[in-house]
Image (cartoon, rainbow, N blue to C red):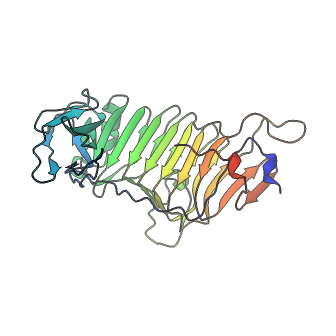
Amino acid sequence: MRTKSYSRIIFVILLGIASVAAALCLFCSCTFSGGKEGMGDGHIILNCSFDYLTAGESRRYYAKQSPSSADYVLVWESSDESVATVDKDGNVSALAGGKTRIRVRAEGKPYRAEMELTVADVAVGAEEGKQALQSAVDNVKNNGVVLITGGYFDGIEVDKRLTIKGAGDAAVAGITVEDDAQLFINSLSVYATPGSEANACVKVGKNASFTAVGCTFFYDDPTAQTTSDVAVSAPADASEIYCRACSFNGYSECVAIGATDGYIYIVNNDFSDAETAVCVDLRRSDVGEDGRATGKVADNVYIDCSECVKLLFNALSYTGTLEIPDSEVSVPH
């Protein structure tokens, strides 16, 4: 089967992409920032590169100057002062849910460093009960941030724009992203159990957007003898599916996506357990007289994995690697 006849579909499957080097930071733990700019023999290093706070919290960050004899005048800044402010000594006050960058620079010198700070509107811990997460999701504002500091929680439904950050052993028993909603999850475990609806970790609705970075999706079967069908399931017309640096365990099919005009980016994930890593169903109901689907079908798709990718066309199926010249490849940033 010649794949170039589907000129509106741009698929790339690259083998041997280097694994993600940057480790995700856990709650209240900092890693040293290596950021420095400019020429010369000096630089500044922050004691954190990533951190999380909850609205109302404060924390002090420190900048190491080099050479050790340097006595730079340091200027601290927050890229979004509606999320967090910082004073002249590096004391940060978290104000509202969102993301900001805390920056420090040497006055009159080309030396600077910065860190990313996520401020949660609310933090949820295991001691608050398995249903506490849904309550937090329901009550947080649109575009809000929920931080899970650990524990197992019941499945949740998301009907707004929301970010959920996990830390420690945080795990959720399934997520439903409702029609038109947008969900970003980071450093979170999501699982399904036998008997749960469709045994899927995540179900994505129409016109919905789902992004997962550094997450684990697993099927929790006490018998350890069976696998489930699909981990992340998205029907036709999902707006965006983005999975990076995630691992999938106990699923015969990791990501199943219907025909969409949206954006699909699946890269640097661990699919080692799966029979099929990604299945993209390109079958459409709007088929022309020639038997081919009409209209645009996913022209912004980037898939990188070493396992099987399955494509389903109208009355046809294809399994394997699509060979498309580099000149036809569109890689999103």
Q: Is residue 120 above or below residue 22?
A: above
Which of the 4 image quadrants contains residue 123? top left
Residue 296 can be seen in this image: yes
Q: Relative to the observer, which residue lies in front, 305 or 170?
A: 305
Q: Relative to the observer, which residue lies in front, 31 or 223?
A: 31
Which of the 4 image quadrants contains residue 58? top left
The number of numbered badges drawn on the structure is 0
Which of the 4 image quadrants contains residue 132? top left
Q: Residue furthest front?
A: 40
Q: Is residue 76 above or below residue 312?
A: above
Q: Relative to the observer, which residue lies in front, 71 or 179?
A: 71
Residue 262 x, y percent position in the rendering = 61, 37
Left or right position of 8 against 199: right
Left or right position of 181 against 323: left
The residue sitting at 28% across, 29% down in the picture is 80
Q: Residue furthest top?
A: 82
Residue 54 x, y percent position in the rendering = 22, 39
Q: Residue furthest right?
A: 289
Residue 117 x, y percent position in the rendering = 27, 41
The residue sitting at 63% across, 57% down in the picture is 13
The residue sitting at 35% across, 43% down in the picture is 164
The residue sitting at 79% across, 39% down in the picture is 293
Left or right position of 272 against 281: left
Question: Image quadrant for the N terminus?
Answer: bottom right
